[in-house]
Protein backbone atom coordinates (compact mmCIF):
# COMPACT_ATOMS: atom_id res chain seq x y z
CA UNK A 1 0.00 0.00 0.00
CA UNK A 2 0.93 3.64 0.01
CA UNK A 3 0.26 6.49 2.36
CA UNK A 4 1.50 10.04 1.94
CA UNK A 5 0.45 12.48 4.65
CA UNK A 6 0.55 16.25 4.75
CA UNK A 7 -1.31 18.82 6.83
CA UNK A 8 -4.47 19.95 5.06
CA UNK A 9 -4.14 23.66 5.67
CA UNK A 10 -1.59 26.12 7.03
CA UNK A 11 -1.56 29.86 7.54
CA UNK A 12 1.54 32.03 7.79
CA UNK A 13 2.40 35.71 7.80
CA UNK A 14 4.02 37.60 4.95
CA UNK A 15 7.79 37.73 5.44
CA UNK A 16 7.85 34.75 7.79
CA UNK A 17 9.14 31.20 7.35
CA UNK A 18 6.87 28.18 7.04
CA UNK A 19 7.67 24.46 7.07
CA UNK A 20 5.33 21.99 5.39
CA UNK A 21 5.87 18.40 6.46
CA UNK A 22 5.26 15.21 4.52
CA UNK A 23 5.50 11.65 5.77
CA UNK A 24 5.28 8.67 3.48
CA UNK A 25 4.93 4.92 3.63
CA UNK A 26 5.13 3.46 0.16
CA UNK A 27 5.90 0.12 -1.41
CA UNK A 28 9.11 1.34 -3.01
CA UNK A 29 10.86 4.67 -2.99
CA UNK A 30 12.94 6.31 -5.69
CA UNK A 31 12.60 9.97 -4.85
CA UNK A 32 10.30 12.67 -3.49
CA UNK A 33 9.00 15.74 -5.25
CA UNK A 34 7.44 18.99 -4.09
CA UNK A 35 5.09 20.90 -6.37
CA UNK A 36 3.26 24.19 -6.04
CA UNK A 37 -0.23 24.39 -7.49
CA UNK A 38 -2.50 27.39 -7.84
CA UNK A 39 -6.19 26.67 -8.21
CA UNK A 40 -7.14 25.57 -11.71
CA UNK A 41 -3.54 25.35 -12.90
CA UNK A 42 -1.00 22.62 -13.47
CA UNK A 43 1.48 21.81 -10.69
CA UNK A 44 4.79 23.63 -10.88
CA UNK A 45 7.96 21.72 -9.99
CA UNK A 46 9.76 23.00 -6.90
CA UNK A 47 12.21 20.33 -5.81
CA UNK A 48 13.33 16.73 -6.04
CA UNK A 49 15.14 14.77 -3.31
CA UNK A 50 16.42 11.26 -3.63
CA UNK A 51 19.28 11.31 -1.10
CA UNK A 52 19.08 12.32 2.55
CA UNK A 53 19.72 15.94 3.28
CA UNK A 54 18.74 19.46 2.43
CA UNK A 55 18.40 20.90 -1.06
CA UNK A 56 18.29 24.68 -1.19
CA UNK A 57 16.97 26.68 -4.10
CA UNK A 58 16.45 30.35 -3.42
CA UNK A 59 13.60 30.93 -0.98
CA UNK A 60 12.64 27.26 -1.11
CA UNK A 61 14.43 24.35 0.53
CA UNK A 62 13.49 20.70 0.78
CA UNK A 63 14.73 18.08 3.20
CA UNK A 64 14.56 14.31 3.04
CA UNK A 65 15.16 11.54 5.56
CA UNK A 66 14.68 8.16 3.89
CA UNK A 67 15.09 6.21 7.11
CA UNK A 68 12.25 8.18 8.72
CA UNK A 69 10.05 8.40 5.63
CA UNK A 70 9.93 12.14 6.13
CA UNK A 71 10.37 15.28 4.10
CA UNK A 72 9.68 18.94 4.55
CA UNK A 73 9.45 21.98 2.32
CA UNK A 74 10.72 25.22 3.83
CA UNK A 75 9.57 28.53 2.42
CA UNK A 76 11.39 31.66 3.54
CA UNK A 77 10.51 35.34 3.23
CA UNK A 78 6.92 34.47 2.45
CA UNK A 79 5.12 36.52 -0.14
CA UNK A 80 1.42 36.81 -0.80
CA UNK A 81 1.90 35.03 -4.13
CA UNK A 82 3.10 31.95 -2.22
CA UNK A 83 -0.52 31.30 -1.24
CA UNK A 84 -1.18 28.02 -3.04
CA UNK A 85 -1.39 24.29 -2.52
CA UNK A 86 1.85 22.42 -1.99
CA UNK A 87 1.91 18.81 -3.09
CA UNK A 88 4.29 16.14 -1.89
CA UNK A 89 4.73 13.30 -4.39
CA UNK A 90 6.69 10.08 -4.37
CA UNK A 91 8.10 8.08 -7.24
CA UNK A 92 8.21 4.45 -6.24
CA UNK A 93 10.39 3.00 -8.98
CA UNK A 94 12.81 4.14 -11.61
CA UNK A 95 11.72 4.28 -15.22
CA UNK A 96 8.32 5.23 -16.57
CA UNK A 97 6.30 5.15 -13.37
CA UNK A 98 3.78 7.74 -12.22
CA UNK A 99 4.10 10.12 -9.32
CA UNK A 100 1.92 9.31 -6.31
CA UNK A 101 0.64 12.46 -4.70
CA UNK A 102 -0.24 13.31 -1.15
CA UNK A 103 -3.46 15.24 -0.49
CA UNK A 104 -1.68 18.57 -0.60
CA UNK A 105 -1.35 21.43 1.88
CA UNK A 106 -3.24 24.66 1.24
CA UNK A 107 -1.06 27.52 2.42
CA UNK A 108 -2.57 30.93 3.06
CA UNK A 109 -0.16 33.84 3.43
CA UNK A 110 -1.66 36.76 5.31
CA UNK A 111 -0.46 40.32 5.76
CA UNK B 1 12.47 22.50 -21.68
CA UNK B 2 9.79 19.91 -22.23
CA UNK B 3 6.25 20.99 -23.03
CA UNK B 4 3.01 19.04 -22.98
CA UNK B 5 0.15 20.81 -24.70
CA UNK B 6 -3.29 19.90 -23.34
CA UNK B 7 -6.60 20.84 -24.98
CA UNK B 8 -9.20 21.99 -24.34
CA UNK B 9 -8.50 23.99 -21.21
CA UNK B 10 -12.17 24.24 -20.37
CA UNK B 11 -15.21 22.38 -21.64
CA UNK B 12 -18.86 22.35 -20.69
CA UNK B 13 -20.94 19.48 -21.98
CA UNK B 14 -24.40 18.08 -21.53
CA UNK B 15 -25.00 14.99 -19.49
CA UNK B 16 -24.80 11.87 -21.66
CA UNK B 17 -22.40 13.27 -24.23
CA UNK B 18 -18.72 12.43 -24.70
CA UNK B 19 -15.71 14.68 -24.37
CA UNK B 20 -12.21 14.15 -25.73
CA UNK B 21 -9.14 15.62 -24.08
CA UNK B 22 -5.82 15.69 -25.94
CA UNK B 23 -2.29 15.79 -24.60
CA UNK B 24 0.53 16.33 -27.05
CA UNK B 25 4.24 16.33 -26.27
CA UNK B 26 5.81 19.10 -28.32
CA UNK B 27 9.55 18.59 -28.11
CA UNK B 28 10.03 15.06 -26.89
CA UNK B 29 8.59 11.62 -27.39
CA UNK B 30 6.30 10.43 -24.64
CA UNK B 31 6.09 6.66 -24.71
CA UNK B 32 4.06 6.84 -21.51
CA UNK B 33 1.47 9.39 -20.42
CA UNK B 34 -0.16 9.52 -17.00
CA UNK B 35 -3.71 10.76 -16.57
CA UNK B 36 -4.85 12.32 -13.31
CA UNK B 37 -8.14 13.66 -12.00
CA UNK B 38 -8.44 16.32 -9.33
CA UNK B 39 -11.63 17.22 -7.50
CA UNK B 40 -11.93 20.59 -5.76
CA UNK B 41 -9.63 20.99 -2.78
CA UNK B 42 -8.22 17.52 -3.28
CA UNK B 43 -4.98 16.21 -4.68
CA UNK B 44 -4.18 14.59 -7.99
CA UNK B 45 -5.45 11.02 -8.23
CA UNK B 46 -3.91 8.77 -10.86
CA UNK B 47 -6.54 7.39 -13.20
CA UNK B 48 -4.50 5.47 -15.74
CA UNK B 49 -1.17 5.02 -17.43
CA UNK B 50 -1.23 5.31 -21.18
CA UNK B 51 1.39 3.46 -23.24
CA UNK B 52 2.08 4.11 -26.90
CA UNK B 53 0.87 1.26 -29.06
CA UNK B 54 -0.68 -0.79 -26.27
CA UNK B 55 -3.64 -0.81 -23.90
CA UNK B 56 -3.74 1.60 -21.01
CA UNK B 57 -3.41 0.43 -17.43
CA UNK B 58 -6.23 1.69 -15.21
CA UNK B 59 -6.13 2.26 -11.47
CA UNK B 60 -8.51 0.41 -9.24
CA UNK B 61 -11.97 1.90 -9.31
CA UNK B 62 -11.56 3.68 -12.66
CA UNK B 63 -13.94 2.40 -15.33
CA UNK B 64 -11.98 1.66 -18.48
CA UNK B 65 -15.13 1.65 -20.63
CA UNK B 66 -16.05 5.10 -19.41
CA UNK B 67 -12.63 6.70 -19.63
CA UNK B 68 -11.23 5.65 -22.99
CA UNK B 69 -7.53 6.23 -23.48
CA UNK B 70 -5.77 6.13 -26.82
CA UNK B 71 -2.03 6.57 -27.27
CA UNK B 72 -1.62 6.08 -30.99
CA UNK B 73 1.66 7.93 -31.44
CA UNK B 74 4.72 8.90 -29.47
CA UNK B 75 3.48 12.45 -29.15
CA UNK B 76 -0.27 12.17 -28.63
CA UNK B 77 -2.45 10.64 -25.94
CA UNK B 78 -6.20 11.21 -25.66
CA UNK B 79 -8.70 10.66 -22.86
CA UNK B 80 -12.37 10.40 -23.83
CA UNK B 81 -14.97 10.69 -21.11
CA UNK B 82 -17.93 8.79 -22.49
CA UNK B 83 -21.54 9.35 -21.45
CA UNK B 84 -20.45 12.07 -19.07
CA UNK B 85 -22.43 12.76 -15.91
CA UNK B 86 -22.26 15.65 -13.46
CA UNK B 87 -20.13 13.58 -11.08
CA UNK B 88 -17.45 13.44 -13.79
CA UNK B 89 -17.02 17.19 -13.49
CA UNK B 90 -13.41 17.62 -12.45
CA UNK B 91 -9.97 18.89 -13.41
CA UNK B 92 -8.19 16.39 -15.67
CA UNK B 93 -4.44 16.67 -16.18
CA UNK B 94 -1.85 14.63 -18.01
CA UNK B 95 1.83 14.12 -17.28
CA UNK B 96 4.76 12.49 -19.03
CA UNK B 97 8.34 11.57 -18.29
CA UNK B 98 10.41 13.85 -20.45
CA UNK B 99 14.03 12.92 -19.73
CA UNK B 100 14.95 16.53 -19.00
CA UNK B 101 16.52 17.49 -15.71
CA UNK B 102 14.79 20.81 -15.12
CA UNK B 103 11.58 19.39 -13.71
CA UNK B 104 13.27 16.23 -12.50
CA UNK B 105 11.82 14.47 -15.47
CA UNK B 106 8.05 15.03 -15.30
CA UNK B 107 6.10 17.52 -17.37
CA UNK B 108 2.42 18.32 -16.86
CA UNK B 109 -0.18 19.53 -19.28
CA UNK B 110 -2.06 22.68 -18.33
CA UNK B 111 -5.18 20.75 -17.35
CA UNK B 112 -8.77 20.56 -18.55
CA UNK B 113 -11.67 21.80 -16.45
CA UNK B 114 -14.67 19.62 -17.37
CA UNK B 115 -18.13 20.69 -16.31
CA UNK B 116 -21.04 18.38 -17.06
CA UNK B 117 -24.46 20.00 -16.87
Image (cartoon, rainbow, N blue to C red):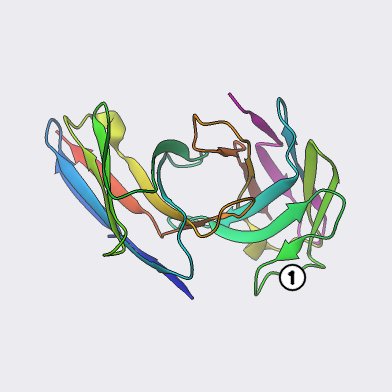
Where disc 1 sits, the SS reads: loop
Q: Residue at x 45, y 60 (%)?
A: A29
Front residue of this view, candidates A75 and B19: A75
Label 1 belongs to which residue? B63
Residue placed most toward the observer, A74 or B87: A74
Q: Position of residue A86 (x, y in %)?
A: 36, 46
Q: Is residue B28 left or right of residue A102?
A: right
Q: How many marks?
A: 1
**Percent of width and height locating residue B54:** 85, 56
Residue A4 falls in image quadrant:
bottom left
Q: Is residue A110 left or right of residue A88?
A: left
User: What residue is at 39 percent from the left and 48 percent from the top?
Assistant: A50
Which of B38 and A51 lies nearest the eye of the viewer? A51
Q: Quadrant of residue A49?
A: top left
Vertical position of residue A48 compared to residue A23: above or below: above
Q: Residue B11: within the magenta?
A: yes
Residue under the point 80% across and 39% down: B76
Question: Looking at the picture, how far across and down is residue A19, in whole percent?
Answer: 19, 47
* Magenta residue check for B61: no
Q: Residues within 10 Å of mark 1 (few under 14, many from 20)?
A: few
The range drawn in magenta is: B1-19
- Image quarter of residue A38: top left
Amino acid sequence: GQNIDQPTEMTATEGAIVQINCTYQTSGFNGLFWYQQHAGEAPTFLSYNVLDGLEEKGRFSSFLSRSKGYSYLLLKELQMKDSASYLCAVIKNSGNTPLVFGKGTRLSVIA
Amino acid sequence: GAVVSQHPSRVICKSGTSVKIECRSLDFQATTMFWYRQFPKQSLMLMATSNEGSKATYEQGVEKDKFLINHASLTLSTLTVTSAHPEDSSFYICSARDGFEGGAGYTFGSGTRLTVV
